[in-house]
Image (tube, rainbow, N blue to C red):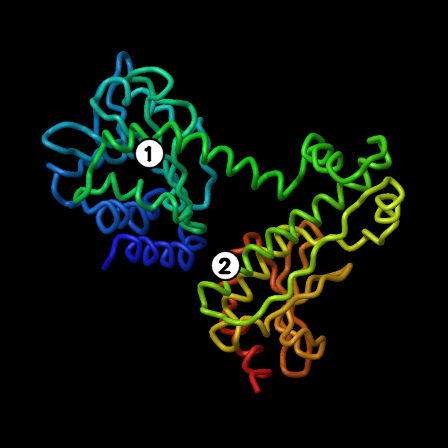
Amino acid sequence: MEFSERLDALATKVKNQATAIGTEEATKNAFVMPFISTILGYDVFDPLEVVPEFTADVGTKKGEKIDYAIMRDGEVQILIECKPSMGPLKIEHASQLFRYFSVTNARIAVLTNGVAWHFYTDLDAPNRMDAKPFLVLDLLDIDETLIPEIQKLSKESFDLDSIISAAEELKYIGALKREIAGQFREPTDDWIKFFTSRVYEGAFTQKVRQQFTGLVRKAALQFLTERVNDRLKTALGVSGITQVVEPTAMPSAEVAEADLDRDTEIETTLEELEGYQIVKAIACGEVKPQRVTHRDAKSYFAVLIDDNNRKPVARLHFNGRQKYLGLLDEDKTETRHPINDLDEIYDHADSIRDAVRRYRG
């Protein structure tokens, strides 16, 4: 099995089991040890390769332990600190990593909850672990560009010099990508003003700022979902001619003012589009992807077959504090299932497929 295939297999396991893992020990057994063994290729039962509960007294701190130390040629190369899978990762969780990093030969430190993996090194000061990771791997949303870098840490392809030399670029590219993603989710005033000034010739007043906040967010989300759909079509080998409609230019303030009067009460969010893509990915096992469409409304975001309201697959109720996935039976009676994370949609994959099968003909 190829490296990327092993990573995908572990990612599938994480998606299916993450909500059932509640303790740090369970996280180690279910996710961390498989990552060390199947992804990085080290023998977790060989103390010459992997030392659990690694101890190295640091100053007045005696008997503190790091969850795992990965060894090569008798030297510590990678330190791993684990947290429960359902908990967020914060730099405050890495205090022991900071201390151990400075007194061992390790150049790589890892903080993980089994789902997210934060990789650190010492770019800012020699032998002192950086406060920010140079690489962030999320097994629920794998960035394929990072796979070759992760592979460099595996036993078979270990290339520490290469990954250290690339770490600075990885650090800033990763940070920039996360910042861009944040702007897609919730654009800042600077982001809104930047794009508004490119298409609107009038003064950037408070009214204009308020109106363009919604327009910029919608434009960004539409751009994102179009790119996702293009990638999905390419991955699934969907052929066909796509009609390209050139956007109308905004040559004057009067044209822009006309756009400001459009109804903006219905707001499609990034979460709704991400939820739609999950439902669509599940549905594509039963029908061609171009048949799966969506419509947004004030009260819910609908996923449909053939863009037909009489062929509903699911409804995403994401406008309130509690999110719900609405599933409909053969009589179109809806049952709402509370979800706290979008990945919980996968728990209802069978019901989604059943709904799609009703309209497969």
Q: Residues within 10 Å of mark 1 (few under 14, many from 20)?
A: many
Quarter of the N terminus within the rendering: bottom left
**Location of mark 1 (residue):** 110
Which residue occupies 31% across, 20% down?
Answer: 99
Q: Secondary structure at mark 1?
A: strand
Q: Earlier in the sequence, mark 1 or mark 2?
A: 1
Q: Observer-nearest residue: 360 or 45?
A: 360
Closer to viewer: mark 1 or mark 2: 2
Q: Residue at x 76, y 45 (%)?
A: 214
Number of on-image labels: 2
Q: Is residue 143 left or right of residue 329?
A: left
Residue 347, position in %: x, y? Answer: 49, 64
- Is 231 located above or below residue 193 in the figure? below
Front residue of 62/352: it is 352
Label 2 crowd bin: few (<14), some (14–19), many (20+), radius 10 Å: few
Where residue 30 sits: x, y (%)? 31, 51
Residue 192, given in percent of the width and then of the height, sits at 72, 36
In the image, 312 versus 224, the foreground residue is 224
Q: On screen, 324 above or below 216? A: below
As shown in the figure, which amino acid type bears the numbered disc 1? Val
Q: Which mark is residue 231?
A: 2
Q: Of all residues shown, which one is farthest toward the bottom?
A: 361
Mark 2 residue type? Arg
